[in-house]
Amino acid sequence: MLPEQIDYTKESVLIVDDDVYLSETLEKLLEALGFSARSTNNGADALELLKDSDFTFVLTDMKMPEMGGMELIERISKNISNVNIIAMTGYTEGYKYVDVINAGASDFIKKPFNLEELEAKIRRIITERNLRRELNRLSITDSLTELYNQRHFYSRLQEEVTRAKRQRHPLSLILLDLDKFKEYNDAYGHLAGDEVLRTAGQIINRCIRVGVDSGYRYGGDEFAIILIDADLEIANEIGRRIQNAFCENGKIGVSLGYSRFSDEMSVKDLVSEADKELYKDKTMRKNNT
């Protein structure tokens, strides 16, 4: 079985050690493997660097003046997310593996070590991190449409409502329902119906603002879109794009309902308002056919 291909160029390593020669040597060796690497000789500077840069790894010595490695590990773990820490220590320094891991480190390596041993530890951490990310992605994703699922919709919407209240930025919601989907499913079969649902997911992802908005399979043939920093004018524009895309596809139509968050609204209120507007649009479209 071939080892997993890992792109080291996506990883950035901060080396923290008061042995300047060792730090500079490690920096060059890691860069030769493809990592982005930087070094500093004390914990206080490391914390400042971590605030302003997206490091994915910290390699820290345990015995340093002013701020020791254990304190640095604890402070990183408490205040900075998405950073994996590997503690480095000499054989005689007396730090226990379990104590270092409990402080927040991902692994522990004893000096002197060779590059192959360090790389193996980093590879294991990256593999486990990527697996956790993939499992988390699967747990919040609808497998058919590749949109987020309903459980994640309510979790994310609650976060955005809380943020909108605090930061007073606009927040809008679109609910979508496929027109006469049951009839289409009965006429052409479930495989054809599944293909329509997949296409709906593709259309939604294509029409929303990448990295800003998010699409969800709300249930059955119902979908939702959370629009960040968007008033109803933006929501209507995105809705028009979606309706035009369904018209171009030609298989099925779509009804839409919109709501805009205001301070007195709860998550339930925001969804309910969009649902009422969706019902109105669906009724009107039925009456016009």
Image (cartoon, helix red, strand yellow):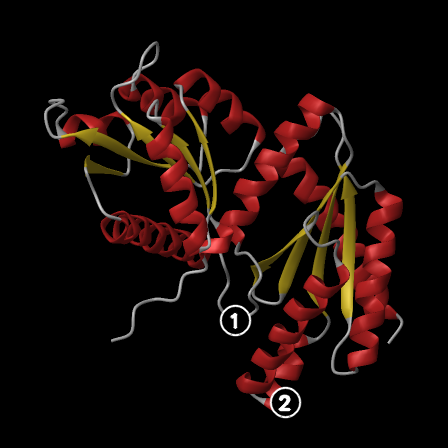
Q: Please determine whether, in this image, residue 125 is positioned above or below residue 95.
A: below
Quadrant position of the N terminus in the picture: bottom left
Q: Is residue 194 left or right of residue 98?
A: right
Residue placed at 41% from the left, 57% from the top?
134
Between tags 1 and 2, which lies in front? Answer: 1
Of 152 and 63, the residue lying toward us = 63
Q: Which residue is disc 1 drawn over?
A: 144
80 over 178 or under it: above or below: above
User: Dot 2 lies on which element?
Assistant: helix
Q: Quadrant of residue 266?
A: top right
Q: Quadrant of residue 191?
A: bottom right
Q: Quadrant of the C terminus?
A: bottom right
* Label 1 to label 2: alpha-carbon separation: 20 Å
Whole-percent x and y of residue 119?
A: 30, 51
Q: Is residue 233 visible?
A: yes
Residue drawn 66% across and 75% down? 199
- Look at 52% across and 21% down and name the residue there: 48
User: Residue 285: percent from the left, percent from the top?
Assistant: 84, 67
- Where residue 19 sits, quadrant-wise, is top left
- Identity, as a three-letter code, of the amino acid under mark 2: Ala
Q: Circle 2: is it few (<14), some (14-19), or many (20+) Cα within 10 Å?
A: few
Give the number of callouts: 2
Q: Which mark is residue 187?
A: 2
Name above or below for residue 160 compared with residue 225: above
Q: Secondary structure at mark 1?
A: loop
> Which residue occupies the foreground of this view, 207 or 272?
207
Looking at this rendering, what residue extends furthest in the top direction?
A: 66
Mark 1 is surrounded, within 10 Å at the Cα level, by few (under 14), some (14 to 19) or many (20 or more) other residues, namely: few
